[in-house]
Amino acid sequence: MDCRDQPVGLGDKVRLLSVPKWLLDKLPEDEVKSIKSMIGEVFIVDEIDEYGGVWIEKILDDGNGMIHSHSISLNSDEIELVLKK
């Protein structure tokens, strides 16, 4: 479910509304900045885990030929359904 109690499934597109504070508190500042930049963007749901967590991923290019990614699990109040698959 999303923030409006709409069902969310694999392959659906969701907008990231917020990131849990507890997660940001555990990360180095450069990762916090990177993850916060994801807020407001639309992502495809990669996985729904056994606890109902909706997983999204962003692949980032650091500009030096290196890439890294962030995968995070989100609760319903942290996402908004944009488009059903």
Image (cartoon, rainbow, N blue to C red):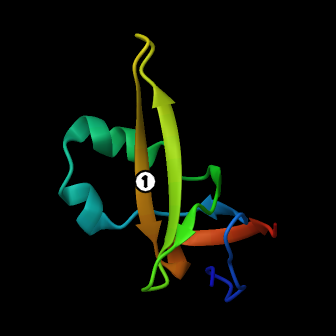
Q: Provide the residue designation for mark 1.
A: 71
In the rendered view, would you say 66 is above or below 16? above
Q: Quadrant of the C terminus?
A: bottom right
Toward the top, the furthest residue is 64
Residue drawn at (43%, 53%), measured in percent from left and top?
A: 71
**Where is residue 46 drawn, in percent x and y?**
58, 61
**Where is residue 36 drawn, in percent x and y?**
42, 47
Q: Quadrant of the N terminus?
A: bottom right
The residue closer to the viewer here, 45 or 77, is 45
**Where is residue 54 drawn, in percent x and y?**
52, 72
Classify residue 81 by image quadrant: bottom right
Residue drawn at (27%, 62%), measured in percent from left and top?
A: 23
Residue 40 seen anywhere in this rendered image of the structure:
yes
In the rendered view, would you say 82 is above or below 7? above
Residue 38 seen anywhere in this rendered image of the structure:
no
The residue closer to the viewer here, 9 or 35, is 9
**Where is residue 2 drawn, in percent x and y?**
63, 80
Type of amino acid under label 1:
Ser
In the rendered view, would you say 47 is above or below 33? below
Toward the bottom, the furthest residue is 5
